[in-house]
Image (cartoon, rainbow, N blue to C red):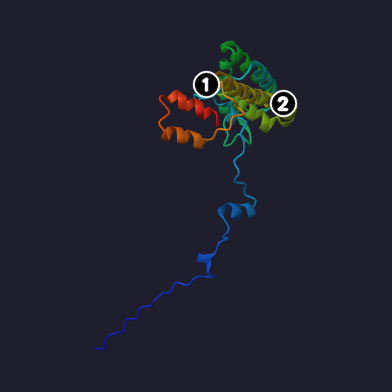
Amino acid sequence: MEKGVQKKEVLHYKELNDWSNAHHLASLHNILGSWNVDLTAKDDDISNKVSYDCTFEAMSIEIADVCTQGLKGLTIHNDTNTLARETSLLPLFMGLNGLEQTKDKQYKEDAYTTVYKNNILTPKANEHWSDRKGKYSSRANAWILTKIIKLHNKEYYETTLKPLLKKRLQDKNKSKHEKKLEIIEKQGIDINNIFIFGNISEKATREEYKEEAAIATDLTKVI
């Protein structure tokens, strides 16, 4: 019998347009950008509310009052897939629970009463108002209220709430700046003195630092 002849196909790799040596290939950012997909991280309303110990800062009574007043005429659902589309009990209750940190439990309960009266609850939301309130009692973040108002009461947000949030951020930045100046004054640092990291390296090489406090003092000169 005649044996069949087996043939092997040899595949050859061929570069197209010498792409491996190209220096101007489009990045993923550029490609998605051409499709109007924004990859830039935006400053969220809540991002500046976290303190150094990773807990949410208490909302001031002024902002809290404005938030409670801004939750008016909204349709509140029992549940929803996204806050951007509609307001539901979970984010609303999380926000209201956070108001206890602003003042006290009674202040929080008064806010609950006001919001219940001033908004439109769907039949399901009205039915589950009490049991959801108990279920979500341990979840608290008052700053979510600013997000709800921004999404669902836009005019009120722009004219009333946003200016207060902006002022709060400015005051916070001013406070940080003043603290830095206070540190400089306490350390007796001459801000006109030219001092760079190279100087620190040289002093360390010469073993001039006898304690960590001395290094910290020099570091404040270049921060």
Q: Secondary structure at mark 2?
A: helix
Q: Which mark is residue 131?
A: 1
Tally of numbered tags: 2
Dot 1 alpha-carbon crowd within 10 angstroms: few under 14, some 14 to 19, many 20 or more = few
> Label 1 is placed on what type of residue?
Asp
Along the polypeptide, which appears first: circle 1 or circle 2? 1
Between marks 1 and 2, how big is the CA–CA gap? 36 Å
> Residue 209: x percent and y percent?
42, 27
Taking depth in this image into account, of 174 and 90 the one nearest to the observer is: 174
Give the camera-side residue of 83 and 161: 161
Residue 156 visible? The answer is: yes
Where residue 80 sits in the image (x, y, percent)? 58, 34
Residue at the spot 41% in from the left edge and 33% down from the top edge:
206
Task: Please report contact status of discs 1 and 2: CB closer than 8 Å, yes or no.
Answer: no
Quadrant where the image shows the C terminus: top right
- Is residue 127 visible in the rendered image? The answer is no
Residue name at image x 39 percent, y 76 percent: 10
Tell which of 30 and 66 is nearer to you.
30
Residue at far bottom of view: 1
Q: Position of residue 149 (x, y in %)?
A: 67, 28
The quarter of the image holding the N terminus is bottom left
In this view, the residue in front, 61 or 208, is 208
The three-letter amino acid code for the residue at tag 2 is Pro
| Mark identifier at residue 163 | 2
Query: Residue 46, percent across and down?
Result: 59, 29
Image disc number at residue 117: none
